[in-house]
C-alpha cells in the first residue's frame, strides 16, 4: 500500500511536468494545426540557455529564466516566419517532416555549442524532500510540479480572459470568421509559436532541474505525444489531465510490469497507451471529434 | 517534349523504356554497375552495399508514403523485424539464407499489416503518431524479448553462401545487393502502372472518391502496408547478413526518419526519385566524413565538432528540400533532362 501511494504521488508530480510540455504541443496545434515534433529540441535548447546564463553570467535563477523566455519568443518567431509560413497549405507529411528536420538542426546545434556531456543544474530550490506522511516527494519533482502548475495556470488565464487569448481561440475555431472579425491570423500564428516555445522551454528547464541536462533531454518530448493524444490534440484541459494519467500509469508500469519483462516498461508504457487510445478513441478525452473515417 | 515522339496508345505511353536511347544508356549504366566492383576499393563497395539496402527500403516506403499517401514513421521497425527474422531463422532453425530472405520479408509484411490496421480508422497525423509509437514498441520488443533476440547483445549471423562459395566480402555481397536492388526497383516500377498502383494513387489523391469509384480501401491500404514492409524486411535481412550481426541499435527511430528523408528528398511518388534519394542521403554523411577528416587534419580542429554537423546537415536537407523543391531530386532530374533535350535552342 505504501508503495502504491508513493507511486501515485510520484506519478502526479511527473504528470504535472508532462502536462506543461504537452501544452507546448497543444498551443501550437490548436491555432495552426501543426504538430511540432521539434518540441523536444526546444526543451533541450531552453534548458541549456538557462544553464549557460546562470553559470556563464552568474545571473540569479529568475533572471536566467527571463532570458530563456526571451530566447523562446525569438526562437518561436523566427521558426514560424522563416520555415513554417512557407508551408501553409502543404500536405501533412511535409509539415511533420519539416518539424522533424528542425528538431535535427536544433539538436545538432545544441550538441555543437554545448558538447554532449551530462551536466547538473545548480541547486536553486531547497533540497529537502516533502514528507506527506504516507509518501515522500523528492524536492526536484515537487518544485517542478509547482512550476508546471503555475505555468499552466498562467496559460489558461491568458487563454480565457485576455484579448489575445480570445483572438487565439477564435482563430483555432474558424480562421475565416476570425479574419473577418479583424483578427490578424498571421499574428496569431506567430503568437502561438511563441507560446508553444515558451511552454516547451519552461518544461525543459523543469526537467533539467529534476534529472540533469544533456542533449538527450528532449527525447522525453516524444513520450508526451501520448499525453496529447490521450487528452485530445486541441484541448488544454485534456493536456493537463492526460499528463497526470500518463504520469501515474507510467510509474505504475515501472513498478508492477517492469519485473515481468526485465525493465524498460516505464519508457514504453506511454506508447502502448497511445496506440490503444488511437484505436479506440482517436480524438482523445476532450478533443474535437472531427476525425474523418473512411 | 521530344520532337517526333508521338504515342498512339496507352500501352506505349506507359512503357518503362520509352526509347532506344533510354535503353542504350540504361544498358551502359548496368554494365558500369557490373564492372564497378572490380575497379573500386573495399570502402567504396561497402558504401555501395549500404546504398543498395537504402534503395530497397526507400523504394518500399515510397510505395506506401509517396503513392498511397500513408505516412509511416516506423519503417526502421519493419526492417528490424526482417533482420531479426532472418537472423533467428538462420541461426536457430538452420534455414539457408536464400529461404530466410523471403521469410524475413513475409514476417515483416505481417508486422506491417498489424500496424496498418489503424490506418483504416485514422489518417494523416494520427496514423503518423501511431506508426511512431509502433517504432518504439518494436524497439522495446527487440531489447526485451531476450529468449529470441538475445537483447542488446544481439545475434551473430553467418554470411550467405552458394554451395561452398561464401558471400563474405564487400565485393561478393555487392552482386547479391545489386541483383536484389534491380528486382526491387523493377517490381515497384511495374507495380505502379498496374491496377494496384493506380488504386494506390487514387487513395492518396482522395480516399473518399477512391472508395466511391469502387476501390476497396481496406484491401489496398493493407496491401500497400504489406508490400512496403516486405521491402523493408528484405532490406533489413540483407543488411544484417552483410554486417553479420543484428542488435536493437541498428534499427532506431533515427533510421525511420532517414528512410522518410530519402523518400522526400528523392521525390514523393517517384520510384526513380527514391533511388536518387537513397543514394544522395547515404553519400552525404560519407562525404562529410571525408571532408571533416581532411579539415581536422589541416586545421587541427577537434573532431568533436563534426559529429553534430552531420545531424545539422541532415535536418537542413529535409527542410530545404521541403521548402524549395517539394518534388525532390526526381523533379530536378526531369528539369535537367528537359533542358538538354532541346538545348541549345529551347524556344
Image (tube, coloured by chain):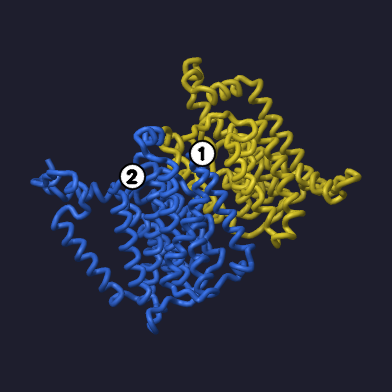
Q: Residue at x 38, y 50 (%)?
A: B63
Outermost top residue: A181
Q: Is residue B127 above or below residue B280?
A: above
Badge 1 is on which residue?
A: B122
Mark 1 Cα within 10 Å, few/some/many (few <14, many 20+)? many
In the picture provided, is B77 more to the left or to the right than A221? left
Check the rendered structure and report the hue given to chain B.
Answer: blue
Instruction: Please tell me whether mark 1 sits on a helix, a strand or a loop.
Output: loop
Q: Is residue B272 visible?
A: no
Q: Nearer the viewer, mark 1 or mark 2?
A: 1
User: In which image quadrant can residue A239 be found?
Assistant: top right
Horizontal and vertical percent position of residue A179: 47, 19
Single out the residue that lies furthest toward the bottom.
B164
Numbered disc 2: secondary structure: loop
Name chain A's colour: yellow
- Work out whether B49 lies above or below A274: below
Image point 47% across, 64% down: which residue? B104
In percent of width and height, residue A13 lies at 76, 43
Disc number for residue B327: 2
Q: Quadrant of residue B97?
A: bottom left
For residue A161, which numbered disc appears in the image? none
Report the quarter where the N terminus of chain B lies. Answer: top left
Q: Chain of mark 2?
A: B
Question: Residues under labels 1 and 2: Cα distance?
Answer: 26 Å
Amino acid at each position: 500500500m505504501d508503495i502504491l501511494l508513493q507511486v501515485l504521488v510520484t506519478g502526479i508530480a511527473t504528470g504535472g511536468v508532462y502536462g506543461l510540455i504537452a501544452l507546448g504541443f497543444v498551443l501550437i496545434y490548436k491555432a495552426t494545426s501543426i504538430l511540432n515534433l521539434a518540441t523536444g529540441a526546444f526543451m533541450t535548447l531552453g534548458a541549456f540557455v538557462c544553464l549557460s546564463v546562470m553559470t556563464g553570467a552568474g545571473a540569479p535563477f529568475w533572471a536566467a529564466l527571463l532570458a530563456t523566455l526571451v530566447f523562446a519568443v525569438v526562437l518561436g518567431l523566427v521558426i514560424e516566419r522563416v520555415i513554417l509560413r512557407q508551408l501553409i497549405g502543404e500536405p501533412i507529411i511535409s509539415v511533420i517532416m519539416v518539424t522533424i528536420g528542425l528538431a535535427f538542426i536544433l539538436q545538432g546545434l545544441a550538441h555543437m555549442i554545448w558538447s554532449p556531456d551530462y551536466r547538473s543544474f545548480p541547486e536553486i530550490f531547497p533540497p529537502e524532500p516533502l514528507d506527506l506522511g504516507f509518501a515522500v516527494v523528492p524536492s526536484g519533482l515537487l518544485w517542478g510540479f509547482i512550476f508546471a502548475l503555475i505555468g499552466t495556470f498562467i496559460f489558461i488565464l491568458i487563454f480565457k480572459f485576455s484579448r489575445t487569448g480570445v483572438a487565439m481561440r477564435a482563430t483555432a475555431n474558424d480562421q475565416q470568421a476570425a479574419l473577418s472579425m479583424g483578427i490578424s491570423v498571421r499574428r496569431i500564428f506567430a503568437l502561438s509559436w511563441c507560446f508553444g516555445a515558451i511552454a516547451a522551454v519552461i518544461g525543459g528547464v523543469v526537467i533539467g532541474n529534476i534529472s540533469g541536462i544533456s542533449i538527450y533531454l528532449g527525447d522525453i518530448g516524444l513520450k508526451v505525444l501520448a499525453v496529447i493524444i490521450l487528452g485530445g490534440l486541441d484541448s488544454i484541459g485534456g493536456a493537463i489531465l492526460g499528463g497526470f494519467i500518463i504520469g501515474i500509469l507510467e510509474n505504475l508500469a515501472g513498478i508492477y510490469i517492469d519485473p515481468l519483462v526485465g525493465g524498460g516498461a516505464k519508457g514504453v508504457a506511454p506508447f502502448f497507451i497511445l496506440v490503444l487510445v488511437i484505436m479506440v478513441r482517436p480524438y482523445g478525452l476532450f478533443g474535437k471529434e472531427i476525425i474523418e473515417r473512411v | 517534349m521530344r520532337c517526333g515522339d508521338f504515342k498512339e496508345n496507352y500501352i506505349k505511353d506507359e512503357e518503362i523504356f520509352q526509347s532506344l536511347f533510354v535503353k542504350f544508356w540504361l544498358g551502359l549504366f548496368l554494365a558500369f554497375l557490373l564492372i564497378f566492383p572490380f575497379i573500386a576499393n573495399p570502402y567504396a563497395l561497402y558504401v555501395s552495399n549500404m546504398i543498395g539496402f537504402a534503395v530497397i527500403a526507400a523504394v518500399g516506403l515510397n510505395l506506401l508514403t509517396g503513392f498511397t499517401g500513408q505516412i509511416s514513421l516506423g519503417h526502421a521497425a519493419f526492417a528490424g523485424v526482417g533482420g531479426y527474422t532472418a537472423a533467428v531463422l538462420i541461426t536457430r532453425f538452420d534455414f539457408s539464407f536464400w529461404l530466410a530472405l523471403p521469410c524475413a520479408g513475409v514476417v515483416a509484411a505481417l508486422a506491417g499489416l498489424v500496424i496498418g490496421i489503424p490506418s483504416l480508422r485514422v489518417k494523416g497525423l494520427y496514423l503518423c503518431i501511431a506508426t511512431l509509437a509502433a517504432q518504439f514498441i518494436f524497439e522495446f520488443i527487440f531489447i526485451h524479448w531476450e529468449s529470441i533476440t538475445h537483447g542488446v547483445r544481439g545475434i551473430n549471423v553467418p554470411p550467405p553462401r552458394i554451395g561452398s562459395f561464401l558471400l563474405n566480402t564487400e565485393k561478393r555481397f555487392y552482386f547479391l545487393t545489386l541483383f536484389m536492388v534491380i528486382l526491387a526497383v523493377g517490381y515497384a516500377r511495374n507495380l505502379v502502372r498496374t491496377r494496384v498502383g493506380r488504386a494506390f494513387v487514387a487513395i492518396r489523391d482522395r480516399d473518399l472518391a477512391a472508395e466511391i469509384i469502387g476501390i476497396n480501401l481496406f484491401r489496398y491500404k493493407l496491401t500497400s502496408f504489406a508490400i512496403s514492409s516486405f521491402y523493408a524486411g528484405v532490406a533489413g535481412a540483407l543488411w544484417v547478413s552483410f554486417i553479420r550481426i543484428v542488435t536493437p541499435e541498428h534499427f532506431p527511430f533515427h533510421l525511420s526518419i532517414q528512410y522518410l528523408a530519402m523518400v522526400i528528398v528523392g521525390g514523393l511518388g517517384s520510384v526513380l526519385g527514391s533511388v536518387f534519394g537513397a543514394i544522395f542521403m547515404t553519400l552525404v554523411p560519407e562525404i562529410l566524413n571525408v571532408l571533416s577528416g581532411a579539415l581536422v587534419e589541416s586545421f587541427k580542429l577537434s573532431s568533436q565538432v563534426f559529429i553534430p554537423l552531420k545531424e545539422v546537415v541532415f535536418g537542413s536537407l529535409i527542410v530545404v528540400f521541403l521548402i524549395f523543391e517539394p518534388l525532390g531530386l526526381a523533379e530536378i532530374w526531369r528539369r535537367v533532362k528537359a533542358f538538354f533535350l532541346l538545348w541549345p535552342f529551347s524556344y
